[in-house]
Image (tube, rainbow, N blue to C red):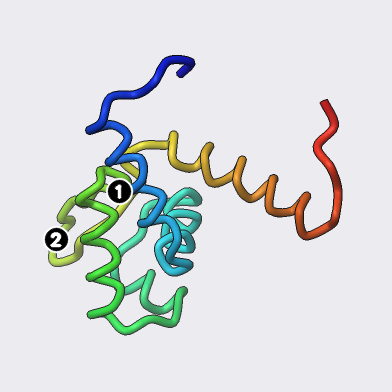
Amino acid sequence: MTTMMNQSVLEETIRIYKLLSNSTRVRILFLLNQREMSVSEMTETLSLEQSNLSHQLKMLREHQLITQKRVGKQMIYTLDDPHIMQLLEQTASHAAHVVEGKKYEK
């Protein structure tokens, strides 16, 4: 995107970055990038209370980062948009360079 983005897209971009500033939500996204999971699987894997996990999942759903489906009595979650993982992977790569004291080579 080389031109200036419109205001509503800019505001949603900022909301998404704020959403991603929470380590629990980022961990959820990395987990769901591996495979779809139920709430009970995620609470166990992430060592979270179900109420906290449900709150985080709701926030991720509201911004179309994950989706849910009912299978029997369970809610199963999956990534809704794989673009978010590209963003997270690029950010993690940059963070690794910063932590390691490396400069980006052009």
Q: Residues within 10 Å of mark 2 (few under 14, many from 20)?
A: few
Where residue 98 sits, quadrant-wise, is bottom right
| Residue 32 located left or right of residue 53 | right
Residue bearing the label numbered 2: 72
Classify 33 as above or below 37: above
Depth order, front residue of 75/91? 91
Task: Point out residue 6 in the picture as x, y percentages from the top left corner.
Answer: 28, 24
Residue type, numbered disc 2:
Gly
Q: Nearer the viewer, mark 1 or mark 2?
A: 1
Where residue 8 sits, quadrant-wise, is top left
Identify the residue at horizontal 36%, vertical 56% (top origin).
19
Identify the residue at horizontal 36%, vertical 45% (top origin).
14
Label annotation for residue 8 = none
| CA–CA distance in space, label 1 to label 2 | 19 Å
| Number of marks in the rendered image | 2
Depth order, front residue of 73/46? 46
| Residue 47 located left or right of residue 14 | right
Task: Point out residue 47 in the picture as x, y percentages from the top left corner.
Answer: 44, 82
Return the residue found at the far top: 3
Closer to the chain start, of discs 1 and 2, is 1
Label annotation for residue 66 = 1
Q: Residues within 10 Å of mark 1 (few under 14, many from 20)?
A: many
Residue type, numbered disc 1:
Ile
Label 1's element? Answer: strand
Depth order, front residue of 98/84? 98
Q: Quadrant of the N terminus?
A: top left
Task: Point out residue 35 in the picture as x, y percentages from the top left corner.
Answer: 44, 51
Q: Quadrant of the C terminus?
A: top right
| Residue 46 located left or right of residue 96 | left
Label 2's element? Answer: loop
Identify the residue at horizontal 28%, vertical 78% (top origin).
52
